Amino acid sequence: MPYAIIKSGGKQFRVEKGGTVRVPLMDKQAGDSVELDTLVVGGGDETKIGAPLVDGAGVTATVVDHGRGEKIIVFKKKRRKQYKRTQGHRQDYTTLKIDSIG
């Protein structure tokens, strides 16, 4: 099964055709088509590694929806110093459906 490693929002993701992936929030509408930066293309016997990107290899995806992840709690404490801080965070994301690789 062919796969690719893409870069989006400063992070890297391994994707396959027909799969979905959650990437950091993109400024696109649901239903839009997106071309993603491709770092590695593999599958079968051959693997192409880019420096930094693979020439001629593109990954096309469709924006499915946008959302927010689950809340995480950030808790800081210094013992015996009466110092405690609690903060919550929810990360925005965009769900992409991979249409084609190559």
Image (cartoon, rainbow, N blue to C red):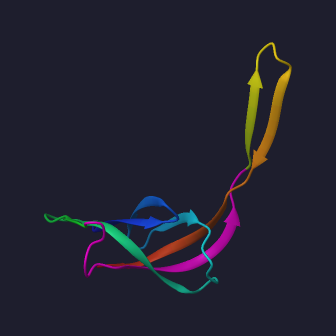
Q: Nearer the viewer, residue 84 or 25?
A: 84
Q: Nearer the viewer, residue 56 or 80?
A: 80
Residue 100 sits in quarter: bottom left
Determine the residue located farthest toward the front in the rendered image: 81
Whole-percent x, y for residue 80 in the image: 81, 12
At 49% across and 61% down in the image, what residue appears? 10
87 up-or-down from 97: above or below: above
Residue 65 sits in quarter: bottom right
> How many numbered discs, if any?
0
Determine the residue located farthest toward the right in the rendered image: 82
Asked if the stretch drawn in magenta spans residue 45, the answer is no
Residue 58 sits in quarter: bottom left
At 60% across and 74% down in the image, what residue appears? 26
Whole-percent x, y for residue 59 in the image: 38, 77
Determine the residue located farthest toward the bottom in the rendered image: 32
56 up-or-down from 2: above or below: below
At 50% across and 68% down in the image, what residue appears? 20
Whole-percent x, y for residue 36 in the image: 43, 76
Q: Nearer the viewer, residue 42 or 89?
A: 89
Q: Is any atom of residue 17 visible in this view?
A: no
Quadrant of image for the C terminus: bottom left
**Position of residue 71 in the picture relative to residue 8 (left or right):** right
Q: Which residues are magenta?
A: 51-70
**Position of residue 77 in the picture relative to residue 47 (left or right):** right
Determine the residue located farthest toward the top in the rendered image: 80
Asked if the stretch drawn in magenta spans residue 56, the answer is yes
**Position of residue 81 in the picture relative to residue 35 (left or right):** right
Whole-percent x, y for residue 45 in the image: 13, 63
77 up-or-down from 81: above or below: below
Quadrant of image for the N terminus: bottom left
Q: Is any atom of residue 61 visible in this view?
A: yes
